[in-house]
Every structure is written in C-alpha cells, then in structure tokens.
Amino acid sequence: MTACSEIERLLVARPLGGLDEGSAALDEHVAACERCAKLARDAESLARELALPEDEPRDGWSALAERIESDRKRRGVKVAVGCAYCKDALPREEAVYCAACLTPQHKDCFAEHGRCAAAGCGETRYVESRVSATPRPRRRRRAPLALLVSLVVGVGAAAALVPREHGHIKVALTPGIAAEDSETYVDVDAKDAKVHDLVTQIGLVTEKNVVTLKDPTAHVTLVRRASPLSEVLADIAQLADCTLQRRGSIFCLVHEPRLAIKFDDTDVRDAIRDLAAHGEVNVSIAPEVHGTVTCDLHNVHWRKALVKIAKTVGDFEVVEESYDFIRVIPRAQIQKEQKLTIILELKHRRGAAAADLKRFIDLAVRQGGELEGVVVDLDAATSSLVATATQPRLEALRSWVARYDVPLATKADGPSFYGTPIRSESSTVCYVIDISGSMGWDMGQYTSPDGTAQTGCRLDRVKAELVKSIVALPPDWRFDVIAYDCGTYLWQKTLVAATDVNKQAAITWVQALQPQGATGTGPAVSTALALDPELKLVVLLTDGAPNCGAGDSSGDGSCTDAHRKLIAQANKQHAVIDVFGIGATGVFKDFCLGVAQDSGGVYADAR
Amino acid sequence: MQEKPAPALAALEDRELMRLALEDPSGPPFHALYDRHKGLVFRYHLRLVGDRALAEDLMQDTFLRIYERLDRFDHERPFRPWLVQIARNTALNALRSRKKKERSASDSLPERPASDRLQAQVIAGEARSHVHEALASLEDEERALLVDRVGLGMKLGEIAESLGCTERTVRNRLDAAIEHLTRALLGRKEETRDGL
C-alpha cells in the first residue's frame, strides 16, 4: 500500500481542485487507513468552508446609484479662471500672476496693459509658472469695455504707487525631478523681491502652504536651480532675517525683531521664562538648569539670546519641540532622546530565518525591556533590518542581532544542532528532547550520522541530529540528555564529561527512545536546569505546544504561558536555552520564541 | 438612474453590457450588470471577510470601482476574471486595513487578567474546529486563491487572467497553499493525539 506521507498532500489537494490525475490509489489507501480517512474528511470539510455561502445581498442599487451620481458630480466640477484684463477664459498654461497681488492675467494682456489690471494695484512685474512659458495665439477681445475700465483704474493706481523698475520674480517647478513625498524641487530667480511676494509665489507654484508672519519688510535677491523647497525657504529666511518654522503642513517665515536685553544677577530660570514669554512660546526647563545670569545684549533675537543665556550656566541646549513649545535641557539628554534610523544587514539569515529573527525582535519590543520603543522593519530583498530608536536602544538591538545572526545552515567548527552552532560559556549542555506521540508522525527523508539517506519519523530525524551533535562535543564539555513526554526521563542524574565512552552510552540511550504520550515541556526543562548550577546551555527540541505538567493542559495560550513561566523561574543560573521547533506556528511558535528570548537563546525551525 | 434594467438587457453578454455602460455609465446596462453579478460578488466577499455588513459595503465598493474603470476594460477579454480581480483586491485591501486596526488596538490595550483570557480561549476553542484554524493559518491571498478555485470554480486559466500571471504561477501558488493546509491539518491532529 502507498505510504501515508506520499498521499497526505494529495488527499487535501483532491477536494480543493489541486489534483489533475485520477484518484483510485487514494481511495484504496483511504479505505485501509483510518488516519488518512480522517484527513480526507477534513479536506472535504475545508472545501465546504471555501464554497460560497447561499446568502443573498440586499438590493443596494439605490445606494450605489447615489454614490455614482455623487462621484460624477465631483468629477464634473471645474474651476474656471478668467483674465482680469480681457475677462476671457484663462488656461493655466497661459497665465501670469501679478507679483504684488497675484491676480491672474494673460501674459500678452499684462504686456499690452503694462501693469496689473486689478483695481488699485498697478504692479508692473509679474510672475509665471513654468507651464505658462509657451506662447499662445492672440485672441480677439470680447470685452472692450472692461479693457477701458481696467486701463483707467490701472493708470490711476499706477500713479499712486512707485513701481520697481528692476525687481522680478520667477519661480517654477524644476523640470525632470519628480516630487517626492516630503520634498519639492524648484527653480527660483528673484531680484530685489519683496519677501512676502516671493514666498507667496513659491507657495502658488509648488502648491504648498507657505506664509510670512509679522510682516518681513526685507527685499531679497536669490537664484536657485533644482533646489529642495525647504532649502530655498531656509535661504530666504536667512536673507530676510526671519526664522523658518514648520507648523504641520505650513511653512512659516517669521520675522522676529531684534531686541536689547539686560539681565543683572537674575535667576536663569526667570530669564528664560521672560524670553519665552516675549517669543510667545511655552517653555519647559530641566531641573538641572539653575544659577544666575548677568548680561547686556543688543540687537539680538530673543531665541538666540535664550540659547546664549542657557549656555552661560552649563552645557544646555534649547530644543524646539514644536513652533510654540521649547525645552531647555542638558545636551547629554538630547543625545539620549534623539531617534536615529540604522540599517543592519543580516549576515547569516535569509528569507524565513530573517523573518523569524524579525518576529523574535518584535516579541522583545512588545515585552518592553532594553528594546522597548524600537521600530524594526525587515527588508526581505536585502535581508536587512531597518530600525529606528534612540541611540542606547539601537546599541541594544545591535547586540541582539549580533547574538542571533549566526550561521544556521552551515556546519560550524564546534558542536551544533540542526546546523546551528551551540555555545556554552561553561562548556556544559543538556539536550532536552520531546518524545511525545506526535514525534512518531510525519515521515520524511533525512541523512543519518553515517551519511546514508534514510526515511523516518520526526523522532528518527531528531535522533540523527542529536547523535551528530553529541559526537561533535569537545572532550572538555560536560553534557546530559533528557527525554520527555508527560514524564521526564534522564539519561544521567548529573552532567558527565563528553568522553568517547560517555558519548557512545548516550547515543545508545538516545537510539532506544520511542514516541509516546503528551508534551510536558516546562517540567522537563526545569529538571534540566536543576541538574547543575553551572549548566549554561539547554538545547530544547519540541514539536508541539506544551499540554501537560503545568497550567490547564489545554495547549492554548494560557497553558504555554504557564510552562514558559515555570522555565523562567527555574532558570536561576541564567542559562541560555536554544529552542528548535518542528512545525511551529501560532501559539506554539510564540512559546518557542518566548522561551528562547527569556534566556537569551536562539530559536530555529527544525524538521 | 433609478430605473430597473430593461428585460432585453438581461439577454446580452457581460462584455456587451460593458460596452453599452461605457456610453451610459450609470444607466440600465450598468444596472443590469450589477443585478447579474451582485450576488456572486457579495457571497465572494462574505466568504473572505466573514461579515455580512462589511461584505455588502465591499460589494458596493467593487461596483463603484468598476464604474470608475469602465473605460479601462479590455473588451477583447472575458469579463468575469476582471470582475473577480477587482472584487478580490477590494476584499484584500479591507482585510489588510482591518488587521492593521486590530494590531494597533491590541497594542494599545492592557493585557487582560489570566482568568478572563482563559475563559475567552476556552469559548473560542469550543467554537472553532481545527479545520477553521487551518484555514485561518493561511495568508489572505492564499485563502482568496482557494476561494477562487473552490468557491467560484474558476479554472486555472481564468485565475491566471485575473491575477495577471501565468497558469504555472497559479499552480505553484495553489500547491503552496495546499501544502500549508496539509501541514496545518496534520499538525493540529497530532497535538490532539499528544493530549491523549
């Protein structure tokens, strides 16, 4: 008869449409094998669960029709802009904007009129976006009366204002550079331009919110090509003696007048509060900031004065948390609080192994401790961790990664288990092997210690790995082996030297193990930890959630938590517990990862 | 906008209705398409998200998307894979969004006392069979693929058309999902035996 392991997948595939060929052999096997018959029934149940239900929806057409109608109206709305001079339609690519009031007009209308057509303006300069550079055919005027009125008003306005003969502003999006999420690139050419006008034009072209506050009066001359918007605004702020603030999505250029400040033997905390009050910001002062200050400052910004005063009493910095909230704190604290992003390229873990490590770290982050607050993402393509956190947390993460990013599949010089090197600071190890009933399932191929290909159940495969590991133990190591189901079975009652004689005895004992019973992981590992206070490494292999000997024996989360707690409490010597899980998923995998993490051990999938 | 589709439209093929709907996007042809496929789309969503109210919302979202993409439909290709593609993407987006909310909610909630948690798990354990657990262990995309194949009875070629990949890729993904389910089913049964 066909072996179960050969047809398990086919039994599941058959009702799920994943089997093309005939299935007489399957039926024959199922008729004679109760286990596979049960699997086949489960697969049929799965197919029923995947079939569409019989339910019918409500009609719903009216609601959908309303949404469609609403969508259509929304798409249909168009904002039309007219020229202030000729009143004709004004496509964006044909528009220029008054440099003073930003009234849109046709370029040739502006040229013909010689100034802005808006009533009361009369500005002689205009700005244009990059897309308006293309010349257009001239149109016939449709509103000669409007032209006449505009001319009269425009001339009157021009007479009242002094036009700047040499100033100009040109702002355009830099062609060929796609706007990124956070940055826009612009070309700016401004000569003797009023800051307010320049900033307004930049906002218009870039479609960003850019404003000036407290009326900067300066005129600036600036030429920038393909520059990030934020850098251009910072330059303008510097030229105009302003500060650039980011208030949400709004860039603010704030003109803050210079002051004369005099403090005479004043408590530094009071001085800082006074300056903050002048700047209309909230302030928080660290308790370390104390002392008195005497100063006589002229022609300074309140903010710069505040920084200087804070430094006179110690190594303190002023941190702007937001535009209206500042903190005065020690410099060392800034370094601690500052969040950085680093990329840690994994050297040995790829694919699922890298994902396992990421999950391991996530678990540690959730549980607080030294990785609390670390945000980690895995770039699967490059097997790199992208981590953001404060410097101390990142250092902790680095040491975690260094500890766990070890070769998994390559054979190391020292002892290993399933290809993972095992390390013990006291050269002691206890293997704790699950021999529950499920270890007798899941037939598969493996390589025996003598290098021949064999077929066997999970326990057979584990035995082969265990024998290889025992054989590789250096002679100066001490070791023991514990097998467990619901009970715990010790090979030796204490750790013994890894001599050839002892190794052979252990291997003989291991080879005789048979699968049976339930899974009492917690008591078994606790027994191992109690063997010797110097035991510093436990190698745990298990294939199922613990369901015996601790907790409510349900095998669910509460039960695995009880086993994990039992192990953590027994680990008084802070031994490392490396965990190898067969078929680990869900609660079971969380348990394995948790036990490894509690002890600083590694977790690896086994088969 | 509110009129019922004319009886004659019911005889037209989907692609012909799509052609007519292009000329009159919210008129009877589109209404006829909606009437013809709303049940299928609703049941498909209900199977994937398991929530009747959400499934009805997703059904509407799906048809709204179809309306928005009327001009993108290739009239040389069959309609059903295109419909399933839109319905699937709508459902998967909703599931991703729901998971994200659940994750952020669970992150911010304090841990419940053990007794409550135990009780909840016992109740959940009684309600869910291992078959459900096996299905729940699949990725959403894998489950959607199996619903396409088993629930909708789509051929591999149709699924490939709707996923924009080759039949071989569909076959590989299907195999991976079945492998995953097999392991999940066996793993669950083994644990049960352990407890004996």
Image (cartoon, rainbow, N blue to C red):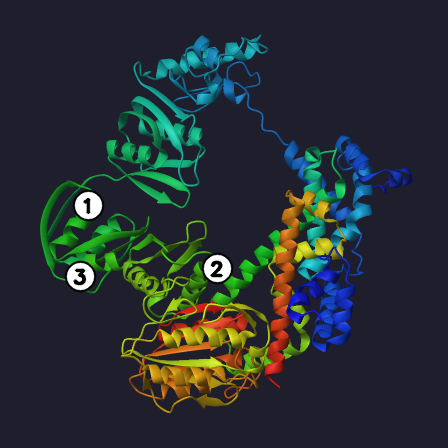
Host chain of mark 2 = A
User: Left or right: where does residue A302 sit relative to residue A142?
Assistant: left
Work out whether disc 2 and disc 3 sit on a shared chain.
yes
- Residue nearest the observer in this picture, B68 or B37: B37
Q: Amino acid at mark 3?
A: Val
The answer to whether residue B110 is seen in the rendering is no
Q: Is residue B71 above or below residue A576?
A: above
Q: Is the same chain shared between marks 1 and 2?
A: yes
User: Which type of secondary structure does the marked residue at label 3 adopt?
Assistant: loop
Q: CA distance from mark 2 to mark 3?
A: 51 Å
Question: B48 or A279: which is nearer to us?
Answer: B48
Q: Chain of mark 1?
A: A
Residue drawn at 72 percent across, 51 percent down: B59
Give whichever of discs 3 and 1 has the lower sequence position.
3
Residue found at x 45% / y 13%: A110
Please rate how many residues cluster around mark 2, counting C-alpha atoms within 10 Å: few if below 14, some from 14 to 19, many from 20. Answer: few
Residue A123 in picture, x, y percent from top left: 38, 18
Residue A2 at x, y percent in the picture:
70, 69
Quarter of the image where one finds residue B72: top right
Residue A439, percent from left and from top = 55, 78
**Residue bearing the label numbered 1:** A304
Dot 1: what SS?
A: helix
The residue singled out by tag 3 in the image is: A289
Q: Please name which of the two marks, 2 or 3, marks the residue nearer to the observer.
A: 2
Query: Is label 3 on the same chain as label 1?
Result: yes
Give the chain of mark 3.
Answer: A
Q: Which mark is residue A352?
A: 2
Q: Which mark is residue A381?
A: none
Q: Nearer the viewer, mark 1 or mark 2?
A: 2
C-alpha distance separating marks 3 and 1: 17 Å
Q: Quadrant of residue A57?
A: bottom right
